[in-house]
Image: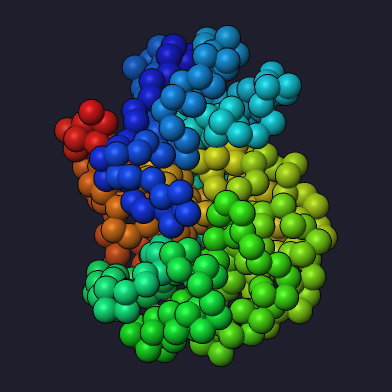
């Protein structure tokens, strides 16, 4: 089975708020679906955390290296693409595009073999996993409370709150936001906090992060994410050594090699590669086992699409210590583009697909509404 062409689909019109200082409008294209076509007629689905324009430019660069290649050898083909673009890739949009190709090739391998991707990645340690709903902090207390109550009413038993005014006003505001969240959802819903230190010109350093971590511990926060700028390796190492809550990060890193020193030197309690930009499932799996060897928990970053969530679910199936997957909520790019949307059960868990490949099918009529 050979690759004949790759097509991209830009998602726009309902792009969720990011929380960035330079916020993007709903019309902005931040996520791109990718379809790998083969000479057998089978098609594989991928997702890329990059605009269509950048993905298409990367595909022009990559095209000589993937046309005619085997469509059922994801690790070898993806590694060939990394190695063949050594001088122009090594991260950024080229690696992001390879991520989507890799996910689609795993989908194809599963469809061709009649096996779910989770089994091909190593096997099912679990059939269900807890999603944490990703939400933004809001300055308006009444609106924020309503957002939290809505997420809990939809079945979420874990919520990650981030960005917005957190870390951008003063310490009192930060604590007011976290206290309101805990009082609203009660003691049985897990809360995570994401400062968003990868935002432009992040002003805070180690001492702010440590004091904030101490405050978060008072509210039983599960982890503190992106407390520092994403290149501050030494700061993260020191913070992890001294913070009373687990420290998480790594969503902006790409390629497995970028994670080696962060994991080995103890920068994170929880490492968060994003399969839609780190290099796909092949790279994420390698990072997973490196993290496991250093007793670091891997929780995939998943601010993307239903295809990205499906990839994360299969990785969670084959992850021996997985506990959560990320789920933007609400997001039409997750909830509206599949023929059979994901559903939380009565315990707030998602069932991991067991059909061949990623186990999902795009609702093309719905996708067309977001790709015009």
Q: Nearer the viewer, residue 357 or 7?
A: 7
Colouring rule applied to residues: rainbow
Rendered position, 82 above or below 31 = above
Q: Nearer the viewer, residue 22 or 332?
A: 22
Name the residue rendered at 54%, 21% in the picture. 58
- For the C terminus, the quadrant is top left
Which quarter of the figure has residue 114? top left
Name the residue rendered at 72%, 52% in the picture. 231
* Direction from residue 167 to residue 88 in the image, left or right: right
**Residue 347 visible in the current orientation:** no
On the image, the x and y values in percent for residue 257 come to 75, 42
Name the residue rendered at 37%, 36% in the picture. 29
Rendered position, 282 above or below 326 = above
* Direction from residue 294 to residue 360 in the image, left or right: left
Q: Nearer the viewer, residue 17 or 157?
A: 17
Name the residue rendered at 81%, 57% in the picture. 264
Disc count in the image? 0
Which quarter of the figure has residue 327? bottom left
On the image, the x and y values in percent for residue 350 come to 36, 62
Q: Nearer the viewer, residue 336 or 202?
A: 202
Residue that lies at the very extreme toward the front in this rendered image: 169
On the image, the x and y values in percent for residue 225 come to 58, 66
On the image, the x and y values in percent for residue 92 come to 61, 34
* Direction from residue 287 to residue 39 in the image, left or right: left
**Residue 18 visible in the current orientation:** yes
């Amino acid at each position: 089975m050979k690759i004949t062409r790759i097509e991209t689909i830009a998602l726009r019109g309902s792009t969720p708020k990011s929380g960035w200082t330079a916020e993007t409008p709903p019309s902005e294209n931040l996520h791109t679906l990718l379809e790998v076509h083969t000479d057998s007629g089978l098609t594989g689905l991928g997702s890329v955390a990059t605009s269509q324009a950048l993905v298409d430019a990367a595909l022009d660069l990559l095209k000589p290296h993937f046309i005619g290649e085997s469509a059922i050898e994801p690790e070898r083909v993806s590694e060939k693409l990394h190695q063949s673009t050594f001088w122009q890739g090594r991260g950024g949009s080229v690696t992001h595009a390879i991520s989507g190709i890799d996910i689609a090739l795993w989908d194809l391998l599963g469809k061709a073999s009649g096996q779910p991707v989770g089994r091909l990645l190593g096997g099912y340690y679990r059939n269900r996993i807890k999603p944490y709903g990703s939400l933004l902090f809001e300055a308006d207390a009444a609106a924020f409370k309503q957002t939290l109550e809505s997420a809990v009413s939809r079945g979420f038993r874990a919520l990650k709150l981030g960005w917005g005014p957190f870390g951008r006003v003063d310490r009192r505001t930060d604590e007011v936001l976290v206290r309101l969240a805990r009082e609203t959802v009660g003691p049985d819903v897990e809360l995570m906090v994401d400062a968003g230190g990868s935002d432009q010109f992040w002003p805070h350093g180690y001492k702010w992060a440590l004091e904030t971590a101490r405050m978060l511990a008072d509210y039983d926060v599960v982890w503190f994410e992106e407390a520092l700028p994403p290149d501050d390796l030494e700061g993260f190492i020191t913070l992890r050594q001294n913070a009373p809550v687990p420290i998480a990060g790594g969503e902006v890193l790409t390629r497995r090699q970028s994670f080696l020193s962060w994991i080995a030197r103890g920068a994170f309690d929880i490492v968060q590669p994003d399969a839609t930009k780190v290099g796909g499932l092949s790279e994420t799996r390698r990072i997973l086992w490196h993290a496991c060897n250093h007793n670091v928990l891997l929780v995939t970053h998943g601010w993307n699409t239903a295809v990205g969530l499906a990839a994360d679910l299969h990785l969670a199936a084959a992850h021996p210590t997985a506990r959560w997957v990320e789920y933007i909520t609400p997001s039409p790019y997750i909830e509206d583009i599949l023929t059979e949307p994901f559903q939380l059960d009565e315990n707030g868990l998602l069932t991991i697909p067991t059909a061949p490949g990623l186990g999902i099918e795009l609702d093309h009529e719905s996708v067309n509404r977001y790709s015009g």
